[in-house]
Image (cartoon, helix red, strand yellow):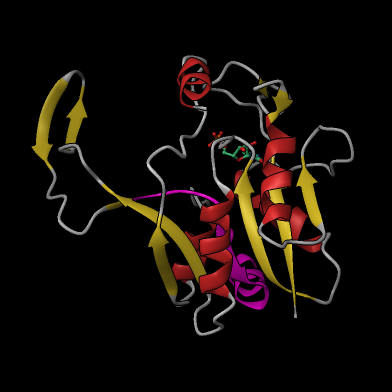
Amino acid sequence: MNLGGVVVAAGSGERFGGPKALVEVGGVPMWRLAADLLESAGAAPVVVVGDVPGGIPGGRRRRDSVAAGVAALPDDVAWVLVHDAARPLATTALARRVAGRLLEGDVDAVVPVIPVRDTLKRVEGGRVVETADRTGLAAVQTPQGFRRAALAAAQAADDRDASDDAALVERHGGVVATVPGDPANLKVTYPEDLALVEALR
Ligand code: C5P
């Protein structure tokens, strides 16, 4: 039962101001860092989704791009790591932690989480309307791991959008386990995030 990988590197990067997968961190494009990361955790093959060398076309939404990547994996791939090209600081230790938990074989998905440190408030029009109870809340990162059949079934079950793939599996009744994430595993969302990422690297 093989472990494959999908790097999502498509999308318009609206908040970034353009596609970001070709942007370099430490002289290496982010899509390649992401592909190397999944390979270092034992994923083979790794499919890159996006307008990058060797990449396959992405979809309109992130979930469409993930689905395209999973569909491009060979049939004998039963376990999949999915990673955002936009997280160039993810470590091999983190990816191995996800893969290791996944391959224990008793859950449908595995996500790395970090506890929410800041107080969370709901804000509307520049004013606080509510302070959320953060008990039990966690911030979720990639790479995420999936039993391929569970991910494919969840993708086929409905067409509603979700900000990550684990949310589809949850919605479909799947069991999603957590492993400790890494606070340094930042996602490049806005242009100013790049300086932070270079400083941390
Ligand atoms: O835009 P955002 O930062 O949320 O994207 C997260 C990841 O999903 C990025 O690596 C981006 O390339 C990918 N993505 C994609 N296809 C889309 C939208 C986002 O592959 N349609």
Q: Quadrant of ligand 1?
A: top right
Q: Position of residue 61 (x, y in %)?
A: 62, 43
The vertical placement of 55 against 101, above or below, is above
The vertical placement of 104 against 34, above or below, is below
In the image shown, does 158 or 100 lie closer to the viewer? 100
- Horizontally, residue 27 falls left or right of residue 104, namely right
Q: Position of residue 23 (x, y in %)?
A: 68, 21
Let me know if residue 147 is in the magenta part: yes
Which residues, given as a range, are shown in magenta?
139-159
Say if residue 39 shows up in the picture.
yes
Q: Position of residue 188 (x, y in %)?
A: 52, 28
The vertical placement of 30 against 80, above or below, is above
Q: Position of residue 198 (x, y in %)?
A: 53, 20
At x 49% / y 52%, what residue is drawn?
162
Residue furthest out toward the bottom: 106
At x 66% / y 58%, what residue is drawn?
41
Give the position of the N terminus as an image quadrant. Answer: bottom right
At x 72% / y 58%, what residue is drawn?
5
Image quadrant in which you'd find residue 26: top right
Say if residue 160 shows up in the picture.
no
- Horizontally, residue 12 falls left or right of residue 96, namely right
- Horizontally, residue 160 falls left or right of residue 123, namely right
Residue furthest out toward the right: 54
Image quadrant in which you'd find residue 156: bottom right
